[in-house]
Amino acid sequence: MATETIFSKIIRKELPSDMLYQDDLVTAFRDINPALPTHILIVPNEHIPTSSDVTDAHEAAMGRMHTVARKLAEEEGIAKDGYRLIINCGEHGRQEVMHIHMHLLGGSDVGPMIVRKKPA
Ligand code: AMP
């Protein structure tokens, strides 16, 4: 089994967090270093390291992450103006914590989707 991360301890409430939501499949808490006024992480309770590790068995949790994101966006008051959902994967995706997580970002314009590199 892949090594757990700090997120498993947050899910089990062994470490403090600003937790906004938890059910049988997913947990949501505020990012410790927010990039925008609203920056929430939504994670499966099960330790799934990256998007590359997602299987058919995880479809319920992956779907729940999205419906919880929608509900939290409404609660945060950012649904009308819009927001961005991001899942980084692996080294090129700049994933830092190896427990799959969805970033819910909003509260102001999030900027361009990616910084386009100039052709070499
Ligand atoms: P990523 O680069 O997609 O892996 O994003 C990891 C995110 O986790 C970053 O935005 C961090 O600020 C956030 N993070 C790391 N440790 C914690 C923590 N203890 N509580 C909340 N957010 C955290």
Image (cartoon, rainbow, N blue to C red):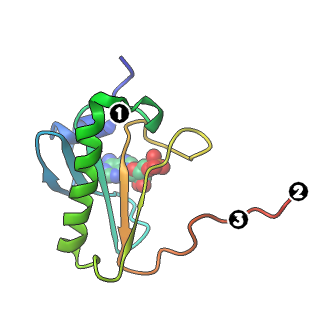
Residue 86 relative to residue 57: left or right: right
- Residue at image location 42% in from the left, 29% down from the top: 53
Q: Quadrant of the C terminus?
A: bottom right
Q: Nearer the viewer, residue 78 or 67?
A: 67
In front of the other: label 1 or label 2?
Answer: 2
Q: Would you name the residue on which mark 3 appears?
A: 116
Say which mark, if any, is on residue 120. 2
- Callout 3 amino acid: Arg
Query: Which residue is rendered at x = 40% and y = 72% of the image?
Result: 36
Say what amino acid the circle numbered 2 marks.
Ala
Q: Which residue type carries mark 1?
A: Thr
Compared across the picture, whether 19 is left or right of 65 comes to: left
Gap in Å between the C-alphas at discs 1 and 2?
Answer: 37 Å
Residue pictured at 48% horizontal, 74% vertical: 110
In front of the other: label 1 or label 3? 3
| C-alpha span from label 3 to label 2 | 12 Å
Whole-percent x and y of residue 118?
81, 64
Q: Up-down: is 34 above or below 7?
A: below
Q: Is mark 1 within 8 Å of ligand 1?
A: no
- SS for tag 1? loop
Q: Observer-nearest residue: 67 or 21?
A: 67
Q: Do the residues labelled 1 and 3 touch (CB within 8 Å)?
A: no
Q: Which quadrant of the structure image shows residue 82? A: bottom left
Q: Write the residue at 23% across / 79% down.
A: 77
Q: Nearer the viewer, residue 26 or 16?
A: 26
| Badge number at residue 5 | 1
